Image: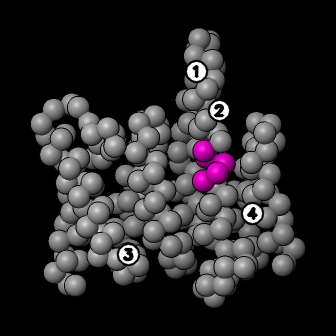
């Protein structure tokens, strides 16, 4: 493994550190490393070779998801009765975490779509199924779905017909429920914006016709 990738791997592992100050330091390093030209070159090559034994963009994405889960859990279990400045700080932290995934996707897919489609879809659906996560990360998940998945033709071919149907049923169910009132299905608690749902269902119908 190259020195550049070794540095990134060490950084990724440190993102799971129990101390928040260490994670904060490492996430800044992480954002710098995924922009480093040498690191990017190695990650691109390993992702294109599809050899799972090397560190690639998908593996780094999984590390990032673990970091987000840890930070989200810390915010969720934090003391509720705090000062206004602390609440503001927490809100800012939530926004930073929320935008981090989209930033990562842009770095990974800037030259070509190298992240696997199912990894992105699983992240979105797993996130919004949790009501508390949906409130925090819903807007960014919608943007990822609309701008980073549905706008990439390569991704249309990376998901099976059965998976497309499964996603469309989730969106169609949500659409019916949100029309009928403010109550949301317990297994799918975040109402995606109507334009996102409609575009997804339109893509499904075109996919089914082409298939």
In the rendered view, tell whether residue 68 sits above or below residue 210: above
Residue at the limit of the structure toward the bottom, as seen here: 49
Tell which of 75 and 113 is nearer to you.
Answer: 75
Query: CB under 8 Å between callouts 2 and 3?
Result: no
To which residue does mark 1 refer?
A: 87
Badge 2 marks a residue whose secondary structure is helix
Q: How far apart are marks 2 and 4 (CA)?
A: 25 Å
Quarter of the image where the N terminus is located: bottom right
From the top left corner, tell me how far across and down residue 20 is, in percent: 76, 36
Residue 37 visible in the shown view: no
Q: Which of marks 4 and 3 is nearer the N terminus?
A: 4
Circle 1 crowding by C-alpha within 10 Å: few under 14, some 14–19, many from 20 = few
To which residue does mark 4 refer?
A: 33
From the top left corner, tell me how far across and down residue 172 is, in percent: 19, 54
Q: Is residue 208 left or right of residue 20?
A: left
Q: Which of marks 1 and 4 is nearer the N terminus?
A: 4
In the image, the segment drawn in magenta is 65-69
- Of tags 1 and 3, the one toward the viewer is 3
On the image, which quarter does residue 18 sit in? Answer: top right
To which residue does mark 2 refer?
A: 74
Q: Magenta segment: does it hold 67?
A: yes
Q: Which residue lies at the image location 26% right of the left edge and 36% below the top edge?
A: 184
Circle 4 crowding by C-alpha within 10 Å: few under 14, some 14–19, many from 20 = some
Badge 4 marks a residue whose secondary structure is helix
- What is the image's colouring? one colour
Q: Is residue 46 left or right of residue 104?
A: right
Q: In this view, does 106 lie to the left or right of 32?
A: left
């Amino acid at each position: 493994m190259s020195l550049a990738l070794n540095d990134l791997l060490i950084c990724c592992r440190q993102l799971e550190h129990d101390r928040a100050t260490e994670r904060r330091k490492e996430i800044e390093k992480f954002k710098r490393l995924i922009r480093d030209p040498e690191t990017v070159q190695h990650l691109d090559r390993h992702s294109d070779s599809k050899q799972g034994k090397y560190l690639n963009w998908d593996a780094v994405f999984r590390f990032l998801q673990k970091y987000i889960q840890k930070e989200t859990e810390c915010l969720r279990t934090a003391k509720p009765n705090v000062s206004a400045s602390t609440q503001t700080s927490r809100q800012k932290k939530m926004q930073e975490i929320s935008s981090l995934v989209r930033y990562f996707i842009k770095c990974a897919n800037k030259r070509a779509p190298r992240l696997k489609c199912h990894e992105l879809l699983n992240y979105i659906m797993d996130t919004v199924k949790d009501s508390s996560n949906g409130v925090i990360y819903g807007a960014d998940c919608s943007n990822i779905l609309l701008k980073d998945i549905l706008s990439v033709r390569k991704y249309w071919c990376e998901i099976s017909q059965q998976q497309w149907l499964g996603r469309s049923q989730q969106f169609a169910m949500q659409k019916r429920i949100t029309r009928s009132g403010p109550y949301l299905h317990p297994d799918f608690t975040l109402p995606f914006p109507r334009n996102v749902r409609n575009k997804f269902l339109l893509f499904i119908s075109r996919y089914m016709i082409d298939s």
